[in-house]
Image (tube, rainbow, N blue to C red):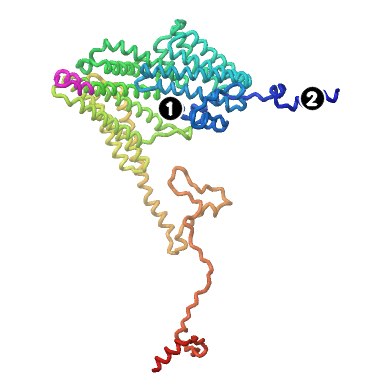
Amino acid sequence: MGKKESELSAMEIDDPKSESSDQILPRFSINVLQLMKSSQAQHGLRHGDYARYRRYCSARLRRLYKSLKFTHGRGKYTRRAILESTVTDVRFLHVVFYMAERAWSHAMEKRQLPDGPNARQRIYLVGRLRKAVKWASLFSSLCSIKTDSRTSLEAEAYASYMKGTLLFEQDQNWETGLACFKNARAVYEELGKYGDLENQVLCRERVEELEPSIRYCLHKIGKSNLQTSELLQIGEMEGPALDLFKAKIEAAMEEARSQQAASLTEFNWLGYRFPVSNPKSRVSILKAQELEKELQGPTAESLPAEKKLTIFDKLFTAYHDARNTIRSDLVSAGNAESVKDDLNGLDKAVGAVLGQRTIERNQLLVKIAKSKLNRKRDDKSEKVTRPEELVRLYDLLLQNVADLSDLISSGRDRKPEEIAFEEECQHKSLAFRAERCFYLAKSYSLAGKRAEAFALYSRARSLAEDALNKFQSIAKKDEGTIQELKILIKECRANSCIEHATGIMEEERVPENLSNRISTISLNDTAAQVEEKYLLDKLDVYESAVGDSNTKTAPKIERFPPAFQSIPRNPIVLDLAYHCIDFPDIENRMKKKGGGFMSRINLWGTKS
């Protein structure tokens, strides 16, 4: 009996359907956050391209279905559900994960439409988010059974985030949405304490991305005293998880602007008051004025340059939208001359303000370029500004000022404010010409052209002095520009003296250099040739063959093209005696041609 029992137990162990074999199956492990972040960053979401990421998810799903042989029928679609018993490979979990990601990215794509989703599109958007929540919940439930504890926690946090995103979009159940976001944050905070450094950084970034949504939910519940400015600062953070939050903030701001636009009935510019009747124009102008306050407010000095450039881009977009709306109103105005005059005046005023902000943006670019001009390059990837780039920027500024001056002088009956503004543009143009001439002289100086650089420095100094006199003569003095012109005059004088002295020194060295060159000339051809040693000729000497990086000499590694070398070859025989030799007659030795009956007839015919 003991022998039979041992055989039965052995059969049970070898049986693949026994319960013990199910218990020793290995649990799968997926780094969900790292998988999600790498997929999103490499396939479009680094630039906010949700359509590209959705196409990637679809292609990834096709590859997974094919590799798993889990296709849905040929010809007719047959749905195949992924159950607990189906998951025999970790790729089945990837299928569920990418199904959730595809639905979420499709919803976010609809959210980022130019004019925002309409009612029908928003219903579709919410439907896709519900689908994403469904797949994320299935992913979490499967991971809780088939994966290790860490993967199960990450899947639970992922599902909680998807549920919170759906409630956030629906503008309802803020308490439930807050609980979902807090649950996800708690999981990532705990996971960020363990693992390698890369995983800890990813978890901390995820916690920072979830924080604005939590604060906004608290604000909607009434448990937070967030101000509008603080919400805007939160909305400036970057990351795919914050795009829905930023869209929500932007929608709230658009609604607030629409309410405030009712009070914006006219646009003031240089003493003129132009009525603004179109609500779209009002909203665009109001948005641009809010952005101008950010650039000109008390906190403008503390803003980094990149942030200011971003604000300028948004401001330009707002003013361009306003001008497009005004011009479409002009087309539909018909024959109403008074309405046309008001719209033309409003278009001119908005265009002039847009020109002023363009000049300010380009001046900011000049300031950034100047800060990099004399900076030592610590990082090899950091780009150093050349004087030619500043010359190009000042060319743009001169063109901007000319366009603005032409726009101001286009009217017939001009007010004193317009005339004063045009004179200010002329003064700015003179100052920009002086700056351009100064950096053009710098570029000639770097090229070693001393005479041209000296002349340009002198010209720049003359232009700067004229501009300084004109800025000091006006009643409303621009102290910043006056100080810059004074510094420019000093630099022009110092650099012109340096170029003059350097030119004289180089002129004095010319005879000495010439005599040194003449002394090396020899009548012997071999001595006249300068011996140049290449890298292969001096391998035993520690000397660079590339040369100095500041010089433009070619590296001496090997002679190219290589020199000709003599090589042995077969001798050439010229047979000159061939035509002078009398060879013996050998016709009797040649084989005679065989003849038949016809040949005899031919021979008889020739004899006859």
Question: Looking at the image, is mark 1 or mark 2 earlier in the sequence?
Answer: 2
Q: Is residue 404 left or right of residue 40?
A: left
What is the tally of numbered marks visible in this picture?
2
Please name the residue that numbered disc 1 is placed on: 51
450, 513: nearer the viewer? 450
Question: Which residue range is magenta in the image?
Answer: 327-345
Quadrant containing the C terminus in the rendered view: bottom left
Residue 350, percent across and down? 25, 21
Q: Residue at x 40, y 57 (%)?
A: 518
The answer to if 582 sits in the magenta stretch is no
Per the image, the residue denoted by label 2 is 8
Q: Is residue 109 left or right of residue 439?
A: right
What crowding class fits label 1: few (fewer than 14 Cα within 10 Å), some (14-19), or many (20 or more)? some
Q: Quadrant of the N terminus?
A: top right
Q: Is residue 208 visible?
A: no
Q: Is residue 569 above or below residue 26?
A: below
Our reading of the magenta stretch's main secondary structure is helix
x, y percent for residue 27: 65, 23
Circle 1/circle 2 CB separation < 8 Å: no
Q: Nearer the viewer, residue 473 or 257?
A: 257
Instruction: Examine the image and state in which quarter residue 363 appears.
Output: top left
Q: CA distance from mark 1 to mark 2?
A: 59 Å
Q: Horizontal and vertical percent for residue 340? A: 17, 20
Tell me, yes or no, whether the highlighted magenta stretch contains residue 336: yes
The circle on residue 43 is none
166 versus 24 height, above or below: above
Instruction: Using the image as rendered, state which of residue 178 and residue 407 is in the foreground.
Output: 178
Amino acid marked by disc 2: Leu
